[in-house]
Image: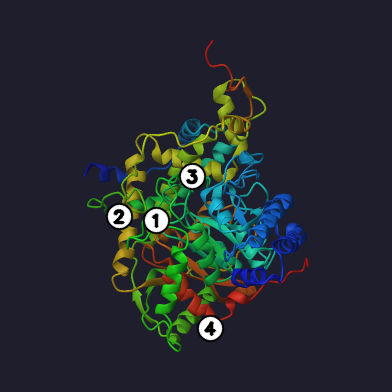
Amino acid sequence: MPTDANASTTKRLERRDVTHVARLARLALSDAEADKALDELNAIFEMIAVMAAVDTSDVLPMSHAIEMSARLRDDVVTEPDQRDAHMALAPATAAGLYLVPRIIE
Amino acid sequence: MHGLTLHELGRALAERQISSMELTQRLLADIGRAAEPLNAFITVDPERALAAARAADQRRAMGDAAPLLGIPIAHKDIFCARGWRTTCGSRMLEGFVSPYDAGVVESCERAGLVLIGKTNMDEFAMGSSNETSFFGPVHNPWDPARVPGGSSGGSAAAVAARLVPAATGTDTGGSIRQPAALSGITGLKPTYGLVSRFGMIAFASSLDQAGPMATSAEDCALLLDAMAGFDPRDSTAIEYLPDGAANASGEQWRRYQRALAELAAVDRPLADVRIGLPEQYFGPGLSDDVRAAVDAAIDQLGRLGARTKSVSLPNSALSVPAYYVLAPAEASSNLSRFDGVRYGHRAAEYADLMEMYCRSRAEGFGAEVRRRILIGTYVLSHGYYDAYYVKAQKIRRLIADDFARAFRDVDVVLGPTAPSVAFPLAAKSADPVQMYLNDIFTIPANLAGLPALSLPCGFGEGGLPVGLQCVGPVFSEARLLAIAHRYQACTDWHRRMPPRPWM
């Protein structure tokens, strides 16, 4: 049971875990915020850690509330063209394009 | 007109005692007076509301007799409504005006309901007190120093204060039922898949479900009937109910009438109802005042003929830990769409694209949303996926199996909705774990996908309302509502109204 063997490896987060995860999540975090987040996340993961003690080796993961297969539909256009309405919501556009900082020199 | 039910307002409109325009104007005036003391609404748009009321009056003049035609309701500000600012309680969407309608908004409009305003809520529905809203906390009408519950706190407070006869809510871990309990109203989380999630801003997609909030079970049945129905734009919407009936408008009301007919014996209407009392829901974490009110409600149900027995949901205590892996994991993925490019907040200053993303998101999201994104990103990250995410999915099945086992012996599982009455503002907001534990009785039904409702069953400490929760097997909402209606027919807890000092 390879997956359940991992379940006991709940360890306390360290400061570098928080900065790593914040970067993955694209969230700017000041030093003070990262310190606070570290304490809060460790308290939350302490609460979560009780899961590790439960034997779930014979249990199938449940990924959805209702067991159902994906519904398929014909591959046809169903959405009306609302390009202008949607682009009007963007913070910065020009000539029908979204503007972001230059990423290619 | 204030304090009338959907049913009564529908009759007053049908008999031309009042027009939808007049009714909407009166409620708009009430909402304006309560704006400062309650903060239940984020956006009120009298012009749009009155235009919808005028259209409803025209429909009636043309002979339309839909039961809800012309009745004003409020939508939680998580539902996109065309032309309405739709914020989800977040700075991220402070200026977002939706270009389209959510499925629920469309179906309510089809039923003739008049959208009068968008209610306040915890940011992105993450909270149990309405204190995480960017637009400020909502105050509980029973005691303005207390929270109304969350995340559908604005809807709950607006209905409790009779500013609207009913409102929509959404429930991912208790966000309809817990505020319904803390504010003294009736609220239903339907079976997952019964109501469209299209246009409902996603928090945790495998758990999110919209439902009605009103002053009685009967009104919840009426509003559920308007809200429910298959929507091809929601990939997990249910097309057919297990007995083959189409999930369509009218079906839920038919089922409710049928369920009522089955519980029609005058003296003992609940003689065929077997109620399970989970021992885990009556443990030391439950406050004495809530326990006393729930015990009295159980006695009352017994006098109506219901048979009660003890059941066990042995994995209940694992529901909060599993939920705080699964819901943040799904949220971190869903909320990655907010990047400051196509819509939503963008930071004013940044050096490059990475900094633009990071600052826009840090500024646009509040503390609780950022916290849950961090939790979710961590549990999905390399090396932790199996230990947390897969493990929590396995626990989720254990919890669903607990209910399946209980429903072999009983028809409904009943207990308190929340462990205490409404708590004071700021009492728990500094301690996330304490706040999360407030949803210990409501989260299991979300994990298992089951319908569950909360109805008022008395008052506890400080004269604050207590909620009774009933959970049923999948697609049993009509029976839950019928049982609740039989209880409400011989009790008046749901008719008690909080003071309205602003009037």
Name, please, the residue furthest toward the front: B62
Question: In the visual, does B476 lie left or right of B345?
Answer: left
At mark 1, the secondary structure is helix
Front disc: 3 or 1:
1
The Cα atoms of the two marked residues, 2 and 1, are separated by 17 Å
Residue wearing tag 4: B490
Question: Considering depth in this image, is B44 or B413 the residue closer to the camera?
Answer: B44
Residue B248 seen in this snapshot: yes
Front disc: 2 or 4:
4
Residue at the image point whose x is 60% and y is 32% from the top: B360
Residue B486 at what x, y percent from top left?
A: 48, 79
Task: Specify whether disc 3 shares its chain with disc 4.
Answer: no
At mark 3, the secondary structure is helix
Residue at the image point whose x is 55% and y is 51% from the top: B106
In what quadrant of the picture does the N terminus of chain B appear?
A: bottom right
Task: Specify whether disc 1 shares its chain with disc 4.
Answer: yes
Which of the labelled discs sits on residue A41, or is there none? Answer: 3
Front disc: 2 or 1:
1
Above or below, B452 against A81 in this view is below
Above or below, A102 against B487 in this view is above
Question: Considering depth in this image, is A28 or B328 the residue closer to the camera?
Answer: B328
Residue wearing tag 1: B447
